[in-house]
Image (tube, rainbow, N blue to C red):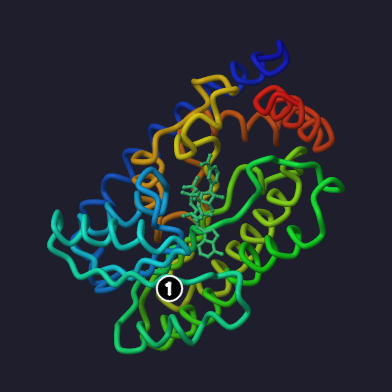
């Protein structure tokens, strides 16, 4: 880690630590709130939920633990079936796996065919596609750029629009968009992903405001590095990585209380430092240097 980054992390500690503890204490009140199922149940949709180590399955587990039935959506068919069965056996909830390519322009009817008879109280938009090779913006071929826009932007809009309208009509619900710290400012070496994540963040923040009077809560989760990718994140400083469970717990605790959750103290400190102690240009340079180190560029 560069000297500059170290000093930034230290500089934000005092403010962010107090803020974090306060948020944690507030959050636990929400988790134990008996109205969670009434407000966000009886069914939730979680997209990108097939991988055992992923954030989507983390959401599915914690929601099942709160007695919410689940529609799990992913492109990975066998893994999705296996996750659904695990949840049925462990939490005794109903689970409907729906294998779908959310990059297809016409995916919606296949999903609504399953959900039309269900009362969907929560939508967790979590799926994403980005190439593992992390090419620069101009090195990535245009077809991949367009596929990313379809999966990470167009599908998010379709899902939010469709289920948001239903929730407003039924007068309760929640929409949780899983964006990223990479969407807070330009993130070199994963520039297209960063742009997709910024789209999700802006969509969610604006929707949060527009639905404030409708009893439908909107929250954007912006995680930093999270242990979902096997060894792919091994190049980053280990203290920057979070486990899935606390990320999901903090997000669910923030639903209905905050419009955005930046999980964990390190991500809060990093965000505080890049938004308060440096220009936006400097924030992009600092992030780019960190990415170059982590990705061995
Ligand atoms: N892990 C991190 O460090 C981190 C940090 C910040 C934000 N996030 C965000 O957290 C969310 C979950 O990420 P994760 O790390 O848990 O990764 P993940 O397990 O790979 O989750 C993404 C899931 O979406 C699926 N998917 C991809 N394309 C799809 C399509 N066209 N239709 C349907 N499903 C599709 C993926 O399947 P395939 O594996 O076959 O592509 C995968 O199962 C993402 O939105 C990500 O941007 C993650």
Q: Residue furthest top?
A: 3
Label 1: element kind: strand
Q: Would residue 194 appear left or right of 178 to someone viewing this image?
A: right
- State how many labels appear: 1
Which residue is painted at 49% across and 63% down in the image? 125
Image quarter in which the C terminus is found: top right
Rendered residue at 27%/52% (across/down): 62
Specify few, some or many for label 1: CA neighbours under 10 Å numbering under 14, 14-19, or 20 or more.
many
- What residue occupies the far right of the structure in this picture? 138
Expressed as whole percent of the image width and height from the top left, the position of residue 134 reads 70, 41
| Coordinates of residue 82 in the picture (x, y in percent) | 28, 57
- Give whichever of 166, 132 is nearer the camera: 132
Q: Quadrant of the N terminus?
A: top right
Foreground residue among 43 and 104: 104
Residue at image point 61% right, 65% down: 151
Q: Is residue 190 left or right of residue 72?
A: right
Tell me the quarter of the picture where residue 205 sits. Answer: bottom right
Report if the beta carbon of the residue with label 1 is closer than 8 angstroms to ligand 1. Answer: no
127 relative position to 285: left or right? left
Q: Give residue 3's quadrant in the image.
A: top right
Residue 58 against residue 13 in the figure, above or below: below
Q: Which residue is mark 1?
A: 216
Q: Is residue 46 above or below residue 277?
A: below
**x and y, in percent, of residue 154 in the image:** 65, 71
Residue at image point 27% right, 62% down: 84
In percent of width and height, residue 4 lies at 73, 15
Relative vertical location of residue 281 with respect to residue 91 in this rendering, above or below: above
* Quarter-of-image position of residue 67: bottom left
Q: Residue furthest front?
A: 78
């Amino acid at each position: 880690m560069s000297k500059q980054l170290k000093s930034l992390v230290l500089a934000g500690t005092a403010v962010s630590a107090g803020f974090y503890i306060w948020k944690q204490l507030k959050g636990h009140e929400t988790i134990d709130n008996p109205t969670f199922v009434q407000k966000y149940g009886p069914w939730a949709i979680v997209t990108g939920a097939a991988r055992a180590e992923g954030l989507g399955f983390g959401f599915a587990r914690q929601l099942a633990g709160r007695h919410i039935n689940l529609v799990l959506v992913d492109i990975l068919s066998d893994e999705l079936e296996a996750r659904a069965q695990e949840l049925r056996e462990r939490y005794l909830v109903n689970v409907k796996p729906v294998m779908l390519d959310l990059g297809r322009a016409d995916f919606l009817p296949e999903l609504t065919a399953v959900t039309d008879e269900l009362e969907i109280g929560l939508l967790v938009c979590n799926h994403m596609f980005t190439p593992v090779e992390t090419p620069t913006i101009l090195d990535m071929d245009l077809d991949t750029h367009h596929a990313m826009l379809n999966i990470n932007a167009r599908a998010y809009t379709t899902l939010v629009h469709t289920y948001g309208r239903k929730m407003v009509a039924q007068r309760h619900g929640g929409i949780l968009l899983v964006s990223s710290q990479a969407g807070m400012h330009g993130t070199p070496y994963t520039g297209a992903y960063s742009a997709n994540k910024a789209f999700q963040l802006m969509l969610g923040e604006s929707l949060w405001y527009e639905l404030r009077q409708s009893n439908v809560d909107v929250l954007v989760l912006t995680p930093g590095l999270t242990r979902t990718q096997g060894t792919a994140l091994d190049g980053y400083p280990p203290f920057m990585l979070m486990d899935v469970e606390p990320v999901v717990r903090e997000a669910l605790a923030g639903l209905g209380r905050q419009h955005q959750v930046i999980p964990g103290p390190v991500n809060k400190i990093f965000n505080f430092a890049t938004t308060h102690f440096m220009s936006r240009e400097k924030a992009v340079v600092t992030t780019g240097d960190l990415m170059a180190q982590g990705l061995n560029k």
